[in-house]
Image (spheres, grey):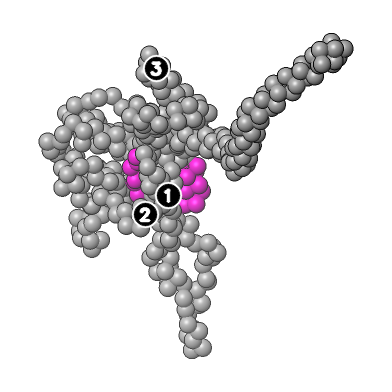
Amino acid sequence: MKSFFKQNLLYILLFFGASTIFIVLLTLSFSYSEATEELISDIKSLHAEKDDLTTNISSFGHIEIDHEASSRDLSKLASKEKDLLNFLNYLVNAKENVSSKWDSKSAESVNASLTRLFSRLRKKCKDSNIILPSDLSQVSDSSPFSSSGTGSKDSAFGFSFSAYDGFWPSFSANEARQIGVQSEIVKSLVDAITLSSDGNHSIEILSLQRENVGDIDKANIGLDLIDLSGLETILLRQVDGVESYVFRITVKIQTFSLRKFINKLRPPFLLREVSISPVEDTASSSSSADNSFELDPFNTDPVKEEKFIPIVSKVDSKVDVVVEYIVDADRNLENIYENLKSSSDSHSEICIQWLEKSGNKILADKAKKFLDEDNR
């Protein structure tokens, strides 16, 4: 037996070594198989999570497209806002706008300016071949005291401020300011009329009406108050932020002068309505009656020759012109800035970008400054 071990010692050692290695490997195999199963389970769960994430991501695939579309819409909206802002600035015409250039005056100063305005406008109309109405026109033609001259007729017209010709109630500063602004607008309107007439084309102003500016003015304005029934829908001040005054002037005018007058109405004047009706010409009708005759075979008197009557015998028309004067146009974009100040989730970068693209750089700079201070 001992000789057997001695003779096969190498094989026996190899056998025991291999057995030991086998047992060790078998033990390690069992131990690692459990870990492998755990790893496989983890990998499967990760694959499942990956599939879920892929599904979720695919469901949000439209976000990038929506972002690009919203960016284009933002640019379009900013462009439209910029165009609207430029259009409103064009209509306000701050360089020529009476309201923006109006200096602060007391009520007494406005009264003095209005009194001087009466004299200047009446003289200017007289020098420009403009006929003005007066209280004398209300007198019956059959009255022996009625006058046909235009010299005395020009003295009573108040250019929509008849109540304050020699009378001045106790206005507040704001109401007096608005009356002062309206008086300057009326001056510009009358100037346009005086520039539309010449020696061959006279214009007769029949009436000039305006809006009241407050309770005291409403109580005194009388017949100078304009009737806005049916006009509100055509006025630009329906747009939020737009402020304006509306005037109606009724004139007896020829087409040539009317075209010149309308062409002179530039912003901040906006032409809102023009109504034209023929003027009742009693002289023409009486003249045609005189020219009529009857054929009488037994009449020995010579037949009167028919006078030449032009085809167009009525060249004057009664025209109602409604104008809107834009006083101010505020887009009120301050609320965007206020929203940035009051809300923590207001998409400030988008708002600032929109403000910059729409031409509101001052507001954009204010918003940036506020956000910088808030981040500190």
Q: Which residues are magenta?
A: 243-263
Q: Quadrant of residue 154?
A: top left
The residue beneath circle 2 is: 231
**Residue situated in front as seen by the camera: 270 or 111:** 270
Mark drawn on residue 375: 3
Do the residues bearing badges 3 and 2 touch, measured as CB atoms within 8 Å?
no
User: Which quarter of the figure is the N terminus placed in?
Assistant: top right
Q: Position of residue 310 (x, y in %)?
A: 54, 63
Determine the secondary structure under disc 1: strand
The residue beneath circle 1 is: 272
Q: Earlier in the sequence, mark 2 or mark 1?
A: 2
Q: Which residue occupies 59% across, 41% down? A: 52
Q: Position of residue 142 (x, y in %)?
A: 23, 63
Amino acid type at image mark 1: Arg
Q: Is residue 158 inside the magenta stretch?
A: no
> Which mark's residue is nearer the viewer, 3 or 2?
3
Amino acid type at image mark 3: Asn
User: Which quarter of the figure is the C terminus placed in?
Assistant: top left
**Residue situated in front as seen by the camera: 203 or 160:** 160
Residue at the limit of the structure toward the bottom, as seen here: 298
Does any portion of residue 205 appear in the rendered image? no
Amino acid type at image mark 2: Leu
Do the residues bearing badges 2 and 1 touch, measured as CB atoms within 8 Å?
yes
Q: Which residue occupies 47% across, 52% down? A: 254
Q: Earlier in the sequence, mark 3 or mark 2?
A: 2
